[in-house]
Image (cartoon, rainbow, N blue to C red):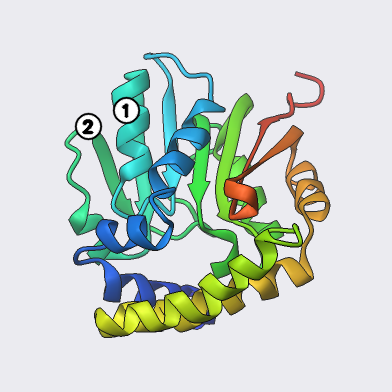
Amino acid sequence: MTASAQPKNEHARRLFDGIAPGYEGPARAFSYLQYGRWHRALVSQMSLSANESVLDVCTGTGLVAAQIADTAGCSVVGVDLSRAMLERARSSSVGLVTGRAESLPFADDSFDAVVFTFLLRYLEDPQVTLRELARVLRPGGQMASLEFYVPRGLIAYPLWLLHTRLVLPVGTRLLSRGWREVGSFLGPSISAFYKEHTLESLGQMWERAGVGEVQNRVLSLGGAVVTWGRKEPTRGG
């Protein structure tokens, strides 16, 4: 199936192309300045050395990729299907490639680590894509992700609903058409995803893809979650 035949792919490309100019400021503001903290929490779960290579899928403007390159000194390649987002990436230390997570243009076992951010809700089949991400990861290599989450607390959940169903839609009306679409889409999209999937079932998807030792860390009272694990050694290897 081509990229144009994938409805969620096409929606994601159009959505992120529309918000690429000036993306980082609103992203920080609407996360109540948690955006950078989430990125740091993601990178902190990865143990990397300067001679290793990392693939950052759904890299966007390359913030996580640049942070990994700057802190670990390793080789990083960022992949995204939005050319407009890649054009906003400013780090000269990161190689940037236009591509889809479902069909990566790399050989098996190409990278020592694979990281992805805010990806799973834009996939037709998360399980198939997790297998593809694991395919390019060497045995024993690390995989880590950052995704939005839904708070579970009696206070946190109503506040999250207020933010995603009122603050975001109203606040983004003052911005571009692309951001207005994000404001109306984001909250319902997150809710729908976690009605279909639990952290336990997502962990089982990682394991079926060949990534074990899966762990989660919930951030910001449940507003986001970091997940990480390691690709299992090749049987008989």
What crowding class fits label 2: few (fewer than 14 Cα within 10 Å), some (14-19), or many (20 or more)? some
Q: Amino acid at mark 1?
A: Ala
Q: Quarter-wise, where is residue 12 in the image?
A: bottom left
Q: Do the residues bearing badges 2 and 1 touch, measured as CB atoms within 8 Å?
A: yes
Q: Is residue 188 visible?
A: yes
- From this view, report whether residue 80 is shown above or below residue 186: above
Instruction: Find residue 75 and report its horizontal and vertical position in percent.
Output: 33, 26
Residue 87 placement, left or right of 165: left
User: Quick one: label 1, few (<14), some, or many (20+) residues within 10 Å?
Assistant: many
Q: Is residue 124 depicted above or below 130 in this figure?
A: below
Q: Residue at x 32, y 28 (%)?
A: 69
Q: Quadrant of the C terminus?
A: top right
Q: Is residue 113 left or right of residue 126?
A: left
Whether residue 6 is visible, yes or no, is no
The x and y percentages for residue 68 are 37, 29
Element at badge 1? helix
Q: Quadrant of residue 192?
A: bottom right
Residue located beneath label 1 in the image: 69
Q: Residue at x 73, y 45 (%)?
A: 206
Q: The N terminus lies in which quarter of the figure?
A: bottom right
Q: Which residue is mark 2?
A: 93
- Along the line of sight, the residue nearer the viewer: 159 or 51: 159
Q: Position of residue 126 (x, y in %)?
A: 66, 61
Residue 57: x and y in percent read 45, 49
Q: Quadrant of residue 144?
A: top right
Q: Residue at x 54, y 39 (%)?
A: 136
